[in-house]
Image (tube, coloured by chain):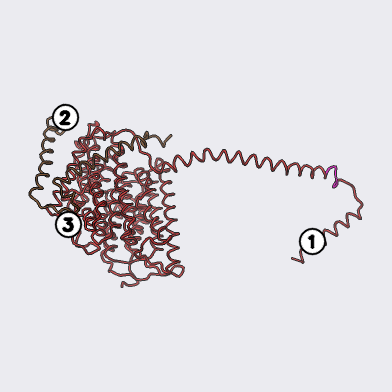
Chain colours: A red, B brown
C-alpha cells in the first residue's frame, strides 16, 4: 500500500499545463521538457498498490493505483509528452502547447485511475484538451474540431450512463476487469471503443487530427486511442467481440489509406489500422495476446509519433500535405527521409525494428489458440500495413516524382525529437529484452527465430513487390473517400433541409387555422365592449352589486385555498 | 543538370535487379530453416511470399472498387 501522499504522475503535466498558459520564452521551453520528465520520474518512483484517496457521493475513489500495466502505459505516455514537447518547442501557439500537456496529464490520470469515476473525469478532460489542440490550428480547423468534440461528448455520455449503471449494480466504483454481460457494461465498452476509433464512428479521427498543426497531430496520435487500448486491456480482456471489431479496424484502415491522398490522413487511417491489431489482441485474451497488445501500444506510440513528426516536418517546411503536391524530398531532407523510413519499417514490423518484436506476439497468440481465420486475417493485415503505410507514405512523400520542392531539413529541436524516437524504434527492435523485462503479463516469446524472420521478410517484401507492380492503380488523385461522417455532415443536414420547410409549412397551416378561430372569437369579444353587452349603460346600484360579488368571490377563493 | 543518381533510369533498373534477387533469396532461405506450420496451409513452400502478395493485390483491387462508389473530389465538403 502506498501512503496518503501518493502523487498522481499526471499532476506534473497538469501543473506544467497551467505554467505553460502563462510562461514565455526560455521558461516556457524549459517547462515543455521538464514537466514530462518529472511525470516520468513520478511514474517510476510510485510503488505498486493502491490507496483510497477520498470519497465522491459515498463511493471510494482511488486516484492512484499502480501496477505493471499502469506503469507500462505511464512510461510511454510520459516519454511521448517529452518528445512531443521537444518537437513543438518552436510552436508559437501557447494554447496548443498548454493543451497538449493537459491532454497528456489527463491520459496519465486515466492510466493510474483505480475507479471508474476518476476514469470518467480524466476521459472528459482529455476530450476537451484535445479539442483545444485541434482548434488552435486556426479557422480551417474550427468545424472539424466541433465535430470531434460532439462525437467525443457523445462517447462520454455513453460512458457516464454505463458507469452509473455499473455502480448501481455492483455498489462499487472500482475499475476492474469485466465482461460485456449487462446493458451498463455494453455502454462502458461502447464509450471506450468510440475513443479507440472503432466502427461505426471512426471518421472523427481522420476528420479532425489532420486539421491540427504540424506539432499538434504528433501529440494527438498518441493519447486518445491508446488510452482506449489501456482501458480495454484493464476492463475487457478476452471479450470475444473485440477480435472482430479489431479485424474490421485493421482492414478499414488499410483500404481507406490506400485511397487517400493527404499524407497525414494516410497516417490517421493507419492509426485505426494499428489500434485494430491491439483491440483484436485484447479480444484474443491470452497472456501472450495481452502482452502483445500492451507492448504493441508502446511501440506504436513511438513509431507513429515518429511518422507524424516526419510528416509534420514536411508540412512545416513546405506548407503542403497532399501526395499529389509532394515527391522527391529525399534530396534536400535526408534526415527527415531516413527517420520517416525507420518509422515506416517499424509500423510494418520489419525485423530489427520495434514493431517486429511486439506485433508478432498478437498473431502468435491467435495461432496458439487455434483461431485459424483470425490468424490468416491478421497475417493479411500485416502485409497490408506495409502496403498502405510502410511503403506508401515514404514513397509518395519523399520519392515518387520530383515535385520541384527543395526544402531543407527542419530546425534542430524537430530533428532531435525525430532522432530520439527513431533510435528508440531501432533499440527496442534490436534489444527486445528491454521490453520483455517489464511486460505487464507473464508469457514467454522469442521473436528472433529463423522461422519468424524469414516468414516476415517474405510477407513484407512480396507486399512491396505488389505495391510497385500495381503502382498505376495506386496513383494519387485529388479525392477523398466518403466515410460514416457523411451521415452527419451531408445526409443529416440535407434531411433537415427538406424536413424543416415541410414542418414549418405544416405549422403555419395549423397555426393559421387556430388563430382564425381564436381571432374571430376575440374580434366578437372586442366588438362587444364597443357596441355589445359590455357597452351598455347600467345603474350605479347594479355596478356596486357586481363589485361586491367580485370582492366576495375573491375573498372566498383566498380563504378557501 | 543531371538528375540525382537515385532518379536515373539505369539506377532504377539496378535497384529492380537487386530487389528481385532479395525476393528470391528470402524464398530460398526457407530451405535452410525449419518452419512450424500451425494450420497446414501455412506450411506450403513460400506461403508468406505468395500469401502476402495475393493479400495485397486483393486489397488494392477491393480499394479500387470501393473507390468507384465512395470517392469524391477533395473539395466535396467545402461546397
| Residue A181: % across, % down | 39, 62
Disc 2, SS? loop
Residue identified by numbered label 2: B3
Q: CA distance from mark 3 to mark 2?
A: 41 Å
Magenta-drawn stretch contains A207: no
Q: Mark 3 or 1 closer to N-term?
A: 3
Vertical position of residue B2 compared to residue A309: above or below: above
Q: Is residue A349 visible?
A: yes
Comparing A473 with A227, the one in front is A473
**Residue A467 location (% of width, % of height):** 22, 38
Instruction: Give the answer, above or below, for where A333 lies relative to A249.
Output: above
Q: Which residues are magenta?
A: A529-534
According to the picture, the residue beneath numbered tag 1 turns out to be A554
**Left or right: where A547 falls relative to A390:** right
Decide if residue A430 is on the left or right side of residue A324.
Answer: left
Q: Are marks 3 and 1 on the same chain?
A: yes
Amino acid at each position: 500500500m502506498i501512503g496518503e501522499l501518493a502523487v498522481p504522475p499526471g499532476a506534473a503535466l497538469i501543473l506544467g499545463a497551467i505554467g505553460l498558459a502563462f510562461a514565455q520564452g526560455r521558461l516556457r521551453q524549459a517547462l515543455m521538457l521538464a514537466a514530462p520528465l518529472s511525470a516520468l520520474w513520478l511514474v517510476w518512483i510510485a510503488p505498486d498498490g493502491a490507496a483510497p484517496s477520498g470519497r465522491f457521493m459515498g463511493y471510494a475513489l482511488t486516484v492512484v493505483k499502480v501496477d505493471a500495466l499502469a506503469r507500462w502505459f505511464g512510461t510511454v505516455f510520459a516519454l511521448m509528452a517529452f518528445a512531443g514537447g521537444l518537437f513543438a518547442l518552436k510552436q508559437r501557439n501557447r494554447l496548443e502547447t498548454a493543451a497538449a500537456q493537459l491532454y497528456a496529464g489527463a491520459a496519465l490520470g486515466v492510466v493510474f485511475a483505480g475507479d471508474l469515476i476518476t476514469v470518467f473525469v480524466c476521459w472528459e478532460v482529455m476530450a476537451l484538451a484535445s479539442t483545444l489542440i485541434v482548434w488552435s490550428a486556426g479557422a480551417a480547423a474550427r468545424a472539424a474540431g466541433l465535430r470531434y468534440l460532439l462525437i467525443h461528448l457523445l462517447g462520454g455520455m455513453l460512458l457516464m450512463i454505463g458507469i452509473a449503471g455499473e455502480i448501481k449494480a455492483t455498489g462499487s466504483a472500482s475499475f476492474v476487469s469485466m465482461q460485456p454481460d449487462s446493458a451498463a457494461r455494453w455502454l462502458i465498452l461502447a464509450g471506450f471503443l468510440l475513443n479507440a476509433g472503432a466502427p461505426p464512428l471512426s471518421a472523427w479521427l481522420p476528420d479532425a487530427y489532420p486539421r491540427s498543426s504540424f506539432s499538434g497531430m504528433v501529440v494527438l496520435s498518441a493519447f486518445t486511442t491508446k488510452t482506449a487500448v489501456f482501458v480495454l486491456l484493464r476492463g475487457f480482456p478476452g471479450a470475444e467481440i473485440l477480435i472482430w471489431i479489431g479485424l474490421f479496424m485493421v482492414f478499414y484502415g488499410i483500404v481507406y489509406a490506400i485511397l487517400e491522398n493527404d499524407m497525414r490522413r494516410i497516417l490517421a487511417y493507419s492509426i485505426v489500422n494499428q489500434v485494430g491489431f491491439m483491440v483484436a489482441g485484447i479480444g484474443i485474451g491470452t497472456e501472450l495476446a495481452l502482452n502483445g497488445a500492451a507492448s504493441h501500444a508502446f511501440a506504436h506510440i513511438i513509431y507513429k509519433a515518429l511518422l507524424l513528426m516526419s510528416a509534420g516536418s514536411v508540412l512545416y517546411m513546405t506548407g503542403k500535405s497532399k501526395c499529389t503536391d509532394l515527391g522527391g524530398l529525399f534530396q534536400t531532407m535526408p534526415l527527415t527521409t531516413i527517420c520517416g523510413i525507420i518509422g515506416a519499417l517499424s509500423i510494418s514490423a520489419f525485423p530489427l525494428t520495434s514493431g517486429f518484436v511486439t506485433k508478432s506476439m498478437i498473431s502468435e497468440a491467435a495461432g496458439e489458440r487455434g483461431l485459424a481465420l483470425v490468424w490468416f486475417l491478421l497475417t493479411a493485415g500485416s502485409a497490408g500495413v506495409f502496403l498502405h503505410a510502410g511503403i506508401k507514405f515514404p514513397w509518395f512523400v519523399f520519392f515518387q516524382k520530383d515535385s520541384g520542392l527543395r526544402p531543407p531539413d527542419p530546425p534542430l529541436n524537430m530533428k532531435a525529437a525525430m532522432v530520439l524516437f527513431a533510435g528508440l524504434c531501432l533499440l527496442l527492435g534490436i534489444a527486445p529484452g528491454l521490453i520483455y523485462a517489464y511486460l505487464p503479463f507473464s508469457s514467454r516469446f522469442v521473436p528472433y527465430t529463423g522461422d519468424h524472420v524469414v516468414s516476415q521478410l517474405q510477407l513484407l517484401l512480396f507486399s512491396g513487390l505488389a505495391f510497385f507492380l500495381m503502382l498505376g492503380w495506386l496513383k494519387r488523385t485529388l479525392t477523398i473517400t466518403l466515410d460514416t461522417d457523411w451521415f452527419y455532415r451531408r445526409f443529416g443536414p440535407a434531411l433537415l433541409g427538406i424536413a424543416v420547410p415541410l414542418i414549418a409549412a405544416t405549422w403555419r397551416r395549423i397555426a393559421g387555422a387556430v388563430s382564425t378561430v381564436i381571432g374571430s372569437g376575440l374580434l366578437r369579444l372586442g366588438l362587444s365592449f364597443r357596441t355589445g353587452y359590455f357597452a351598455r349603460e347600467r345603474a350605479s346600484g347594479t355596478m356596486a352589486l357586481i363589485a361586491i360579488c367580485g370582492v366576495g368571490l375573491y375573498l372566498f377563493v383566498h380563504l378557501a385555498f | 543538370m543531371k538528375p540525382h543518381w537515385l532518379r536515373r533510369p539505369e539506377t532504377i533498373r539496378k535497384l529492380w535487379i537487386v530487389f528481385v534477387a532479395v525476393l528470391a533469396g528470402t524464398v530460398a532461405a526457407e530451405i535452410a530453416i525449419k518452419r512450424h506450420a500451425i494450420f497446414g496451409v501455412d506450411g506450403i513452400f513460400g506461403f508468406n511470399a505468395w500469401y502476402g502478395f495475393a493479400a495485397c493485390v486483393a486489397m488494392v483491387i477491393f480499394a479500387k472498387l470501393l473507390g468507384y462508389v465512395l470517392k469524391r473530389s477533395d473539395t466535396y465538403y467545402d461546397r
